[in-house]
Amino acid sequence: MEAKIREVFESVGSFFSGGDHIPWCDRDIINGCEREVAEAAEGDSEELKRDTIMRLSWALVHSKQSEDVQRGIAMLEASLANSSPPLLDREKIYLLAVGYYRSGEYSRSRQLVDQCLEIAPDWRQALDLKKTLEDRVAKDGVIGIGITATAVGLIAGGIAAALARKK
């Protein structure tokens, strides 16, 4: 019985907290990635430069700071303009989808996830992000309906109280 109660509370808690399973990245990791990019920029290896930029982009779109997420989105969009292998483009598109999800732009994120799934229909990360997006949109809809119903109830109660006073 106690396990059932705990499960209900965890379910309700994750409903209101967002409860997605996308990892977060802290400032220390971002700083480390920025150092790697700076060191790679001094070298001759284009592959190393590309790899360090991808790691930094990953860290930025997984940050809790919205300005980091926006910076990651900008870096990824700029790098998509350069031609690269389809597998790398898939990774960039996925990271862009994560960035847009983190910034609350769910419709843009959904478009990008669908684009990833066109490239790789069975890609687990993209499928998980798609489910997370669908859950988030549904949750936001339920919360919106609850707020609307509460507002209508308050207005109706106010009108009823005003009419009762007039009598």
Image (spheres, rainbow, N blue to C red):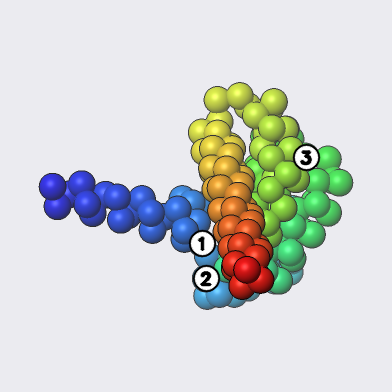
Badge 3 amino acid: Ser
The local secondary structure at tag 1 comes to: loop
SS class, disc 3: loop
Q: Which residue is mark 1?
A: 24
Query: Which quadrant of the figure has residue 162?
Result: bottom right
Circles 3 and 2, Cβ within 8 Å, touching? The answer is no
Q: Outermost residue, right direction?
A: 81
Q: Residues within 10 Å of mark 2 (few under 14, many from 20)?
A: few
Whole-percent x and y of residue 48? Answer: 66, 55
According to the picture, the residue beneath numbered tag 3 turns out to be 84
Secondary structure beneath label 2: loop
Above-or-below relation of 75 to 11: below
Tag 1: residue type? Trp
C-alpha distance separating marks 2 and 1: 7 Å
Residue 148 in view: yes
Q: Mark 2–mark 1 contact, CB under 8 Å?
A: yes
Q: Residue 164 has which mark?
A: none
Q: Amino acid at mark 2?
A: Asp
Residue at 13%, 47% in the rendered image: 1
Nearer to the camera, 43 or 136: 136
Q: To which quarter of the image does residue 31 belong? A: bottom right
